[in-house]
Amino acid sequence: MKTSGMSLNKIKEYTKAFYTEDELACIALLQEHLDKLLTQQENITHYIDVTKNKILNFKSS
């Protein structure tokens, strides 16, 4: 989870919820993390497209 960008505090919360079998808390923490990852993915995709367009503009001029 750390390598996917989850903060240590959130990992601790998740671990506590996991070991106490609090499935609702686990789901909520994982969903929150997934939402953040999807937002990051959208942003990265946007900047990849912008960068590709800039390269194409340089190559066509």
Image (tube, helix red, strand yellow):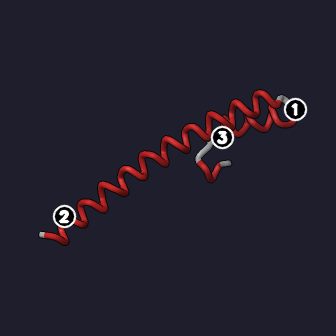
Q: Out of 11 and 41, give the one closest to the viewer.
A: 41
Which comes before the other along the chain, label 3 or label 1? 3
| Real-space CA distance between mark 2 and mark 1, rounded to the nearest whole angstrom | 54 Å
* 16 left or right of 38 in image: right
| Real-space CA distance between mark 3 and mark 1, rounded to the nearest whole angstrom | 19 Å
Residue at point 43%, 51% (across, down):
44
Check disc 1 and report the residue beneath it.
Answer: 21
Residue at point 48%, 45% (across, down):
40
Residue 32 in the image: above or below residue 56: above
Check disc 3 and report the residue beneath it.
Answer: 8
Judge depth for marks 2 and 1 and give the one in front: 2
Judge depth for marks 3 and 2 and give the one in front: 2
Residue 58 rendering spot, x and y as whole percentages: 18, 67
Disc 1 residue crowd, few under 14, some 14–19, many 20+, Cα 10 Å: few
Mark 1 element type? loop
| Real-space CA distance between mark 3 and mark 2, rounded to the nearest whole angstrom | 42 Å
Judged from this view, the residue extending furthest toward the front is 60
Residue 17 rendering spot, x and y as whole percentages: 80, 32
Residue at point 69%, 33% (across, down):
29
What amino acid is at disc 2? Asn
Disc 2 residue crowd, few under 14, some 14–19, many 20+, Cα 10 Å: few
Judge depth for marks 3 and 1 and give the one in front: 1
What amino acid is at disc 3? Leu
Residue 36 rendering spot, x and y as whole percentages: 55, 39
Judged from this view, the residue extending furthest toward the right is 20
Check disc 2 and report the residue beneath it.
Answer: 57
Residue at point 55%, 44% (across, down):
37
Disc 3 residue crowd, few under 14, some 14–19, many 20+, Cα 10 Å: few
Residue 23 rendering spot, x and y as whole percentages: 82, 31
Residue 39 in the image: above or below residue 50: above
The number of numbered badges drawn on the structure is 3
